[in-house]
Image (cartoon, helix red, strand yellow):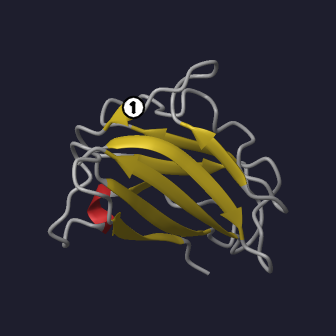
Amino acid sequence: MAGNITGVLNRIQTRQGRPGVAEMVLTCTAHTDGSYPVTVINTLVKSSSFDIQGLKLYSVKSIPDATKPPTDASDLTILDEYGIDLLGGKGADFIKAASKTWTLVGPVGYNAPALITGDVTVNITNNNGDGAIVTLVLELTGD
């Protein structure tokens, strides 16, 4: 089975005067060797009239598939165009096999939304489940 990461960007209606909110829902499927493809997520939504550049990544959620879950304690990094992990290490052991997880963006000990100014790359490691599936929800604000 070939692994892939696909995504949908949803703009969420907010009241006038409030910052815009969006969520990117990524369905991540592992290759037969358990690895996930390293994926630039900006390209998943370039065809739409809405770009994630200029928004701030606020939080990330992980939802394991009930029938083909990833290996417990799989790691997640979300890298900006300079290779800096926007989770600041909070993605170590973040993805669970049997429970949903959630974290704010920023280095360990801090919570600070990260401004998106270029390509953002998602990388999931330490999984060995053939075809394992996990859904990642990236919550964005400030358009």
* Identity of the residue drawn at 46% across and 33% down: 86
Residue at the outermost front position? 16
Query: Quick check: 135 left or right of 132?
Result: left
**In the rendered image, the vertical position of residue 36 relative to residue 140, given as above or below:** below
Q: Which residue occupies the extreme top position in the image?
A: 109
Q: Position of residue 12 (x, y in %)?
A: 36, 65
- Answer whether residue 108 is visible to the viewer in this image: yes
Drawn side of residue 120 relative to residue 27, left or right: left
Which residue is at a point 32% across and 67% down the rendered structure image?
44
Location of the N terminus by quadrant is bottom right
The quarter of the displayed image where residue 66 is located: bottom right
Front residue of 39/96: it is 96
Residue 22: x and y in percent read 36, 58
Disc 1 packing (10 Å; few <14; some 14–19; many ≥20)? few
Q: Which residue is mark 1?
A: 83
Vertical order, 124 against 109 (above or below): below
Image quadrant where residue 110 sits:
top right
Residue 129 percent coordinates (x, y)? 77, 66
Res. 34 visible in picture? no
Count of picture labels:
1
Q: Which residue corresponds to the image point at 28% horizontal and 44% vertical from the top-left?
A: 142
- Residue 83, how many percent across, how many down? 39, 31
Q: Is residue 68 left or right of residue 88?
A: right
In terms of depth relative to the viewer, which is nearer, 36 or 87? 87
Q: Amino acid at mark 1?
A: Gly
Q: Dot 1: what SS?
A: loop
